[in-house]
Amino acid sequence: MPTIITRGAASARGFGFGSVPSPQTFNGFNTPVLYNNTSAGVPQTTVIWNSTLNKFVSAGYSGTASVPQFAVSSTNTGSAWPTPTAVGSISINSGQLAVNSSGLMVLVTYDWSTNYPYYFVGSSGTSWSQGYISSTILHITTAATVNNSGTFYAFGHQSASPYTGQYFTSTNGSTWSGPTTMGTATAFYPMNSVTAPNGNMCVIGYNASTLPTFSVSTNGGSTWTTPATIGSTITNISYAGLAVNSSNQMVWVSCYQSAGGFLSWYSYSSNGGVSWTAPATFSSTKYLMTSVVWDAVSSLWVATGQYSAATPYYPVYSTSSNGTTWTAPAAMNGATGTSYSILSSAINSLGNIVAVGSNSTSAYPVFATSN
């Protein structure tokens, strides 16, 4: 079974190899609800499926002090969650969670006060060790994945010019080596990462011109291509959802600022992230797509986000059987009366999808599950 990996504004999984079943109907999402009915301002920014725990795990940070917050779902379907609990006291930015085949989880991020890269590591979801990936190297570390040999990768960039894209590696999540430059040194700002069943690893983000940019490794992370753009017409991208399926196909969803809101776009790779289609928009309506998963049960890519033209910013989703043709974004269970920020999604082996984020009015943590 390939390693399962997931991201903050996105997620991915490998369910083995073989033919993809014919597409089935996707029944949409329930209306988002608060974690444990809490009114704490702790937006959740990343979620993963941990097959060892048989639970979903999410992470975020306090809306007032940026203190990291973690939660483990109360059910294996993600249909209930406790109030997120604080871990540590440093101020962090949102990062990416990754999990290996043994259930060990790592969140990579960075300390706002110092710009030193930081990690949290644990296997229970309720007890975490933490520390600096480096206390001497300034590094804005934002993305994580695990290669098929079990090595964790933490991606980011130098915190000063020339902002070179780099990565650290660890076999246990607490002792790290690096940083190593991806390809030829160039400005690259990673946002998301994924590992395919065939071992390809892909990191997506943007370059110095804010164009969508990627780097790929076809040898399990030993060497990387110099970051390259996938198009020249879309700039100032926000968020970056990334997922892979068992056929090593990948989908990238993102959005960019447009007059009166955001427009969302997608790109597709048929060869494990080696090359990508030019970005194409989901709709001329203002939507902000932030996350995507591959649903092997329904044979569909499922992207999530929110309407962004005017309040309320209601949550939406869109589906695709081939990664290149998408349904019109639809509201989650008709939830058009409340503003939400949907920031990340993950899926389990049964096809249950959890999308997490916050009530964007009060920054309360919310989740939604697929029907």
Image (cartoon, helix red, strand yellow):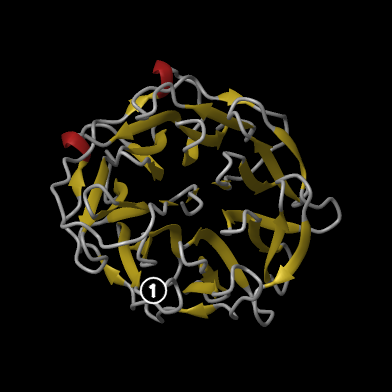
Residue 348 point in image, percent of width and height: 37, 40
Please tell me which residue lies in front, 361 or 316.
316
Viewer can see residue 362: no
Name the residue: 76% across, 64% down. 179
Looking at the image, residue 95 sits to the left or right of residue 329; the answer is: right
- How many numbered circles does the render carry? 1
The residue lying furthest to the left in this view is 25
Please tell me which residue lies in front, 300 or 248.
248
Q: Quadrant of residue 341?
A: top left
Looking at the image, residue 100 sits to the left or right of residue 252; the answer is: right
The residue lying furthest to the right in this view is 136
Looking at the image, residue 72 sits to the left or right of residue 69; the answer is: left
- The residue under label 1 is 234
Residue 42 point in image, percent of width and height: 52, 29
Residue 152 point in image, percent of width and height: 65, 54
Q: Quadrant of residue 371?
A: top left
Q: Tell me the crowding category of disc 1: few under 14, some 14 to 19, or many 20 or more residues within 10 angstroms, Cα based.
A: some
Please tell me which residue lies in front, 85 or 145.
145
Name the residue: 13% across, 47% down. 25
- Location of residue 218 with respect to 54 vertically, above or below: below
- Location of residue 148 with respect to 100 vertically, above or below: below
Name the residue: 20% across, 57% down. 21
- Location of residue 200 with respect to 72 vertically, above or below: below
Task: Tell me the SS state at disc 1.
Answer: loop
Viewer can see residue 326: yes
Q: What amino acid is labelled 1 in the image?
A: Ile
Name the residue: 52% across, 80% down. 228
The residue lying furthest to the top in this view is 37
